[in-house]
Image (tube, rainbow, N blue to C red):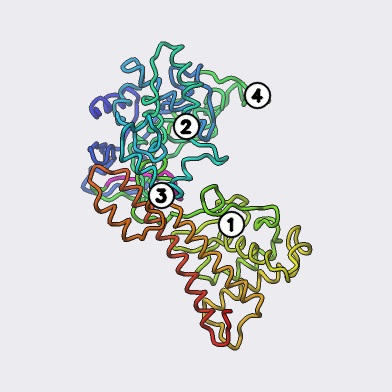
Amino acid sequence: MSLRQFHQWLTTQNIQCHAGTKILYTEDVGMSVVCRTTAPIIHPQRLAVIPKASILSVRSCALSRHIPWAPYGHDATLALSLALYSEILRCDASRWAGYLCSLTADIVPIARLWGHNDAFPDDEDSSDAAQWIQGTEVHKELYSEDGTSLTEDIDTYYRTHVVPILIANDYRPSIHGFLHAYSLVCSRAFLVDSYHGLSMVPVADGFNHIHENHVQLASEYDVCPVCGSLSECPHDREEDSRNMPSVSPQLDPTDTVDMITVRSIPAGAEIYNTYGSNLSNAALLGRYGFLLDDGETDVVTFGWPGSGLIVDRTNFDWSHDLPDEVRGEVEAILEQSALVFKSDLRIHDESSLCINSDGQVSTALFLWVVMDVLSQMPELETHGGVGPGVSDAMADTILHVANALVCFETEEASSSNIPDDQVLRAVLEVAGALVGLCRARIAHVGMKPYRGASAEILGELMDNLCPERTKTRLALQYLLGERAILEACASGWEELRDKIIDLDGYDSD
């Protein structure tokens, strides 16, 4: 790390930083940006102006004509990793040499790479950490949306692209070196515009993350996807410029990436960006290698392999089978529930089947469980009627179950106004199913010998770790947080179930 060389390079690239800011580097934190003034920086301000000519992307690197460009997703991450790695191998010949010297020389300890044998070879801390996140939301971060292993993606890309492209250009690649570049891209890259796509943005990547951020990245995304021009260019007159081969970027000194304030910054404070306002700790640990203490955005999701619940849409689909008016009524009723939080029922993927950081189940998860419970009641006609997969009787019963839930929660139900047996049984079975779902997930996460162990035992293990076991500590810290969410959810539904059973006049048998 050479901050002096980095600052000199910033000057040559005409990258401008606010006079009230200072870039720091420490061993424990790495790079950070702080307010150096004795008075606050008053919003609004531009803290950094970075010409797009200085950013490192697949389109701007020396091997741009050899590396297939990808607009988004893991393919974009891999392509930029190759671009960055090729510039690292160029050493002082790279026009980003002054920037590259500001990057850590070690692989960033992102959870995505904990289990990769070539990232942290012979490292017991990494191998143990990889076992502790088994079955958790962090484990889900190790796979793409279609279920493909990211590790397999990395290894395949290394064999099919990195090795042949670099060797053909007289470089000697290594998997460890590529993983180093990959970890830097995962933890530092930004989506800049439709030409550069995912890119390394000097200075912008020095701001650390919290949800209550001071600054955000601003960039004009809609540029020509062929040449990057911000103004009108010949490609604008082509019918389909997206399929044209890219050309050298049209440099416009007014086309910049800016770090702009979103609120005032206290004197002497570290200045924070946000990598995503809704990023959970699982995403932060998987992609960036750190956790936040509050965990407000954490969720536990279901419906993916290893989550404890695989959704079968062949009988019922919570997002399609209920008509809009019934979904609307259910949502209105459940607004009074402390056990359920409102989720967008128009979202059709399994990510909406979740429990939030307060231990509340999403509307989608609640509905899925209710529909699953009701479909197993032989006396209830489930198909045909108001929706393609839902009968009138089932739709009415769903509404009655939601109403009964709120009544029991608000203690409006008593032995004199208990819902009919069918609805009451359904509420009890829904509560039991959600408790079982949480308990089953708890029993199947973490390192195998300790699955189902108490939080106290896991806490003792974490407390007794030596200081060098940073990855294992992070893994255990995350695991305890996820289990706390599941325990809170299970406890809430157990309490409701016990309240129903304890009502006078109800026979639990």
Work out which quarter of the rendered image holds the N terminus and state it. top left
Work out which quarter of the rendered image holds the C terminus and state it. bottom right
From mark 4 to mark 2, how far is it between C-alphas?
Answer: 31 Å
Query: Mark 3 sits on what residue?
Result: 448
Query: Mark 4 sits on what residue?
Result: 237
**Closer-to-camera residue (192/71):** 71
For residue 253, the mark is none
Amino acid type at mark 1:
Asp
Per the image, label 1 sits on a secondary structure element best described as loop
Amino acid type at mark 2:
Thr
Query: Mark 1 sits on what residue?
Result: 344
From mark 4 to mark 3, how far is it between C-alphas?
Answer: 60 Å
Most common secondary structure along the magenta stretch: loop
Residue 113 in view in this figure: yes
The quarter of the picture where residue 11 lies is: top left
Query: Mark 2 sits on what residue?
Result: 77
Q: Residue at x 39, y 48 (%)?
A: 447
From mark 1 to mark 2, how far is it between C-alphas?
Answer: 29 Å
Mark nearest the camera among 3 and 2 is 3
Per the image, label 3 sits on a secondary structure element best described as helix
